[in-house]
Image (cartoon, grey):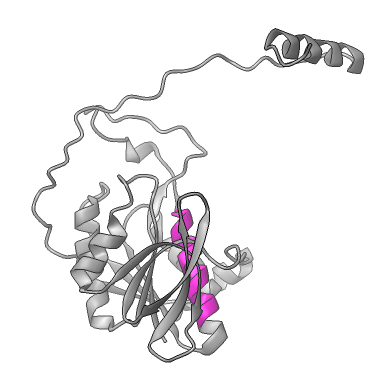
Amino acid sequence: MNLVVVVRQVPDLIEPLEVSASGTALDYETASFVVNETDDHALEQALLLKESGGGTVTVVALDYGEVDNTLYTAAAKGADRIVKIARADDTPPSPAASAAAYAQAIQPLGPELVLVGIQAHDELDGVVPPLLAARLGMPYVGVIRGVKRGPEPGAVSVCKEFPGAVMARLSVRLPAVLGILGAEQPPRYVPVSRIRAAMKTAKFDEVAGAAPPPASRVEVCRLYPPPSGARAEMLSGTESELAARIAEILAEKGLLK
């Protein structure tokens, strides 16, 4: 099976994010980047499909953030090919621009199945996967938790989650684009030694980015950091003093009578 996985870089939420001087975007120069969590699950799912029945896994990513580290990690995990899309701009592309760039890079690969994380935390409403499917002319099914090869060639069996944690098993004809929420198992860990080895052997196929699509009709007028709430109370003292203070707090909140 010819599998393609889209991998995106997102700001690391462990560190505080700053609003830029313009007030309409994050200050990405002060941010550090990590792989988007659901894209990591998409890669894991593709590797599981490859291991269960053969095939190739191609990872496609925009040259943005600290993407090389992510791509070397993907190669160490078992990706067969890496395609990096060149970009002249250091700022993150819009969802429409991302979808156009991914589609242009993926189309020549002739994939049977395209896997992409259902959402990135720096985009609005998870629109990249369906936009990508539309540009590729493929059907799209999102919020997927697990993919298996179908009983017949040319289809896969997917587990789709609906509101209320209701799960349904669907058969999807190929080619198709799937928005992955979670893989059948957590993304695998690879030791640093294997990543360093991949840095010496893995090669990236660099392709040109797509022409930018028409300007989005969604405009960000202003970003504000969330207001700081009340600070937590740090408790100290002996075990009996701590227990007494906890009991007082519960009583104050009406949780203890």
Residue 179 left/right relative to 105: right
Looking at this view, name the residue that lies furthest to the left. 214
Residue 125 left/right relative to 11: left
Q: Quadrant of the N terminus?
A: bottom left
Residue 86 drawn at (x, y percent): 24, 64
- Please tell me whether the stretch drawn in magenta is mainly helix, strand or loop: helix
Residue 86 visible from this viewpoint: no
Q: How many badges with numbers are in the image?
A: 0
Residue 60 drawn at (x, y percent): 34, 69
Residue at (50, 89) in percent of width and height: 54
Q: Nearer the viewer, residue 217 or 62?
A: 217
Looking at this view, name the residue that lies furthest to the bottom. 153
Residue at (77, 14) in percent of width and height: 256
Q: Is residue 10 above or below residue 18?
A: below
Q: Quadrant of the C terminus?
A: top right
Quarter of the view holding residue 2:
bottom left
User: In the rendered structure, which segment of residues is drawn in magenta?
Assistant: 35-49
Residue at (23, 27) in percent of width and height: 222
Residue 116 drawn at (x, y percent): 38, 64
Q: Is residue 112 above or below residue 36?
A: below
Residue 156 visible from this viewpoint: yes
Whether residue 182 appears in magenta in the rendering, the answer is: no
Q: Nearer the viewer, residue 231 or 21?
A: 231
Residue 206 left/right relative to 80: left
Q: Nearer the viewer, residue 54 or 165?
A: 165
Q: Is residue 215 above or below residue 212?
A: above
Residue 205 drawn at (x, y percent): 32, 76
Residue 211 left/right relative to 37: left
